[in-house]
Image: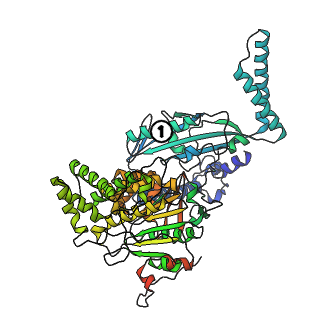
Amino acid sequence: MLSFLSKKKTVNINPVQTPVSPVPPALQPAGQTPGASAAQPVPVQTNTASKAAEIAKNTQLQAAKEKITKGLVNIKDIIAPSLVEVDFDHIRINNVFYRTLFVAGYPRYVAANWLHPLLSFDKSLFISMYIYPTESKVILEDLKRKIAEMEATIQVDMKRGKVIDPSVQVSLDDALALQAQLAKGAERFYQFSLYITIPSETIEDLNRFAKEVESTLGSLLIIPKHATLSQEEGFKSTLPMSIDKLDVTRNMDTTSLATTFPFTTASLSANEGILYGINEHDGSLVIFNRFSLENSNSVIFGKSGAGKSFLVKLEVMRTLMFGADVFVIDPEGEYKDITRALGGDLLDFSFNSPIKINPFDLSGIVTEGENELGLKILSIHGLMRVIMGELSPTEDALLDKALVLTYKQKGITPDPETQKKEPPLMEDLYKVLLGMEEENARHLAERLEKFVKGSLAGIFNQQSNVSLKNQLTVFNIKELEAELRPMAIFSILDFIWTKIKRDVKKRLLIVDEAWYLMKHPDSATFLYGIAKRARKYYLGVTTITQDVEDFLSTDHGKAIITNSSLQILLKQSTAAIDKLAEVFYLSSGEKHFLLSAGVGEGLFFAGASHAAVQFIASSQEYQLATSKPQEVRQDPSFPNVPKIPSV
């Protein structure tokens, strides 16, 4: 302090207090006494004037600088919101509402990762945890006093003959245990704060999401409270600035605190299964066995060129190595190379192809609780609606009567022993309809005539000559017209499903461009029925589509998604992302990822776990799986052919 005062004196510019050297009498002005030299202010006034001028100049420069700076755009101007509105129970920033909750009560017993339901909440949340270490010496002194108080309370109750308060006894036991652990150094003492801020676009959604968060916390025996009249402080406390403005703490020891750490991981590595790719969150391998889930079905959504077929081909090649059978319905002829390379059966389904499938085939097996003939007639009903169009109730009843009669003429009845006989053809149904007296029956026969005698004769009107004995079977329908593809896919699916029921083993059924079936309610119902019952026959159905709108616009499409435990979303278009976000409950970050994802990147949902994955292939797999024209051709005229990556 003395040093500070001495420095202060040396810069004092007061002329009265500033000492000056005495001036000789010979140099003094006339009429001035020698003693006046002690108070001569002339030199000091000169220094003071220069100092004042310098200060004034600096002041002017500072004012000019502030004026120029005021007109410039700085970081604060860029990040500052245009509107901040603080209410007693929420805060609004621009067009987004926020509400902050703080945790006021915790459960007595917890397990590791007990905050997982909160951390994996379907909506994006701002969650902040503050940890304050505390001196053990201070805590031990407080514990000693608290223990003495509780022991005294218990002694008094015992002397008065009162029943000991259980909560006091429990608190005493906890305090004694904590005191022993702190004294040994086995535990340390902390104070812990937990805050949650909920964002939402509207106040109605904010109220709804807040109730959902409170319900989730309540299921964990956590007591949340609204930061009423402190929403601004609560919002700032959940920003990534490490500033706790609410200061609502709870005492915790080291063990209890460790259980609050967000150890939730997006790792999807398992001890068995096939390799899908690399987890982009932590760089781990995504190794997964889809047959270990509740059901083995999967759906794959992505825009054209996102890598859907590439991913499925990789899955096919790797699944075959584990002994599973694979059936593929290929509308674009993309699986030819992989089928030939792996020695599979490639069945070209077209007008001139010798491959024929009879929609009236029966499996010939007896399944307890199922009427094989009845189920087949129901599936043929669906096929006929796809072929003929909408049917009136009268026409539907006539068709059912005709189908029963058609099978009966071949000696096939609900008796399982008769169902091993040769099944009828579409021509037999046509003749039965012509032979019926009702006028509507003749109209149905006319709609069916082109498939029996007309331009489309021969496709669905011959006995099946397909044998599904190969481990890989691909049905190529590329040469069929677009209007016939739904009928062909329906018939092939029905044929495969009939064969699958004969022998239960691990199989995959891949339906590419499934939106063809979603365009018709009956074919959509049939695909949903297969997906729903596939688990009983050890079958995994993979549904692939790029037309997300058509698939999700139907109830059956959504039902197929909910009955698929494995869901993969690749790069999406802006037109489809909102619909997907609604169905899959995507966060804003996941939506942004799908819009900006590269080829072969996507979100991998497996049960309750999901992660961002980069799907990878070896150089040999890449050559078989790629469907890019320039890479398939390997033509020198393509100057920008990328080098095939190797892993």
Q: Quadrant of the N terminus?
A: top right
* Residue shown at 50% from the left, 63% from the top: 508
In the current view of this chain or complex, which residue is farthest to the top?
A: 160
* Closer to us: 263 or 86: 263
Q: Quadrant of residue 419?
A: bottom left
* Closer to us: 75 or 174: 174
* Residue shown at 67% from the left, 33% from the top: 108
What kind of element bears circle 1? helix
* Label 1: few (<14), some (14–19) or many (≥20) C-alpha neighbours in 10 Å: some
Residue to which mark 1 is pinned? 212
Residue 279 in sight: yes
Looking at the picture, how far across and down is residue 362, in whole percent? 41, 59
Residue 549 in sight: no
Q: Total marks drawn?
A: 1
Looking at the picture, how far across and down is residue 236, in whole percent? 52, 44
| Left or right of residue 493, residue 33 in this image | right
| Left or right of residue 519, residue 189 in this image | right
* Closer to us: 495 or 622: 495
**Residue type at the position of mark 1:** Glu
| Left or right of residue 547, residue 47 in this image | right
